[in-house]
Amino acid sequence: MIKARNLQKKFATRPAVDGLSFEIAAGETFGLLGPNGAGKTTTISMLIGLLNPDSGCVEIGDPENRGGSPVDPGVRTRIGVAPQTLALYENLTAKENLVFFGQMYGLAADHLADRVEWALGFSQLGDRRHDRVRTFSGGMKRRLNIAVALIHEPGILLLDEPTVGVDPQSRNHIYQAVAELQQQGMTLLYTTHLMEEAQRLCDRVAILDEGRLLALDSVEGLIGQHGGKSVVTGELMQTVDPGAIDGLTAVTLDGNSIRFESGRPLEEVARLTAQGVVFQALQIKQPDLESVFLSLTGRSLRDQ
């Protein structure tokens, strides 16, 4: 559905995207994960033809149509985009926004009316259809932003940081909406700096930093290859016998506190217990995409 080949884009002398290549299959949810400034929005702008790459190319296609450039209007109509910067008219109502954008896509009157009703239901804004968008909360605007992107029934939807600045209720609605679109077989590209979102929603994830692709795989593949071991921390009932911790990796003892890493944490805890180590409190943190980013860059994604 989407092929990006060696995309390069600079602003002044700073590379925003630096040699980025990937493919997104039909029906796949593909995540672009990285901190602010990693090049995610610039990549989306090139994928939809809003920005021309300095070098490289983008091809958009589907099983029934030959691929083409997103600068081709016929190709671009296959794409829906919910940008990070809201694409809404705040002095229009929710329904007026949907009608306007539907007309821009050339939807005929009867079909447009059906799509507007669908979009209001999808965004759960039916009871606010006649209210001006400027009166909406941030989460309601985000939901309408996604509905506008879907008004023309595209086969591909690009979501650029869709949960930025939203309340927990709207965030959960967006997650549910993504799940519904996945069940319908839509091809999704989802950019985020929140590893929990990528881990929850995406089939494959590309990790970006400073415009470069650091790794690309399924969530399980990335964690298995780059996530490292589980981290076990515990509080002990009494001081541990040093002989009991022989063989532990990266072990730290501080009074009655213990910390170590293990690829088989439950087995190690069971072994320690069998040797008389009594845990008062125990926590096992399994590797996740945060661990992957830390391993690849040496810093935390959350610190960006």
Image: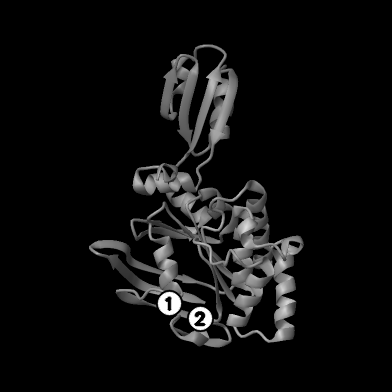
> 70 left or right of 138?
left
| Kind of residue at disc 2 | Arg
Q: CA distance from mark 2 to mark 1?
A: 8 Å
Expressed as whole percent of the image width and height from the top left, the position of residue 125 reads 72, 61
Asked if one can make out residue 80 in the rendered structure from this viewpoint, the answer is yes
Kind of element beneath mark 1: loop
> 14 left or right of 79?
left
Q: Quadrant of residue 50?
A: bottom left
* Residue 49 in the image: above or below residue 285: below
- Name the mark on residue 49: 1
Q: Quadrant of residue 270?
A: top right
Q: Residue at x 62, y 82 (%)?
A: 103
> 127 left or right of 182?
right
> 43 left or right of 77?
left
* Residue 82 in the image: above or below residue 284: below
Say which of 75 and 24 sits in front.
Answer: 75
Question: Which residue was labeled with disc 2?
Answer: 76
Q: Residues within 10 Å of mark 2 (few under 14, many from 20)?
A: some
Q: Residue furthest right?
A: 127
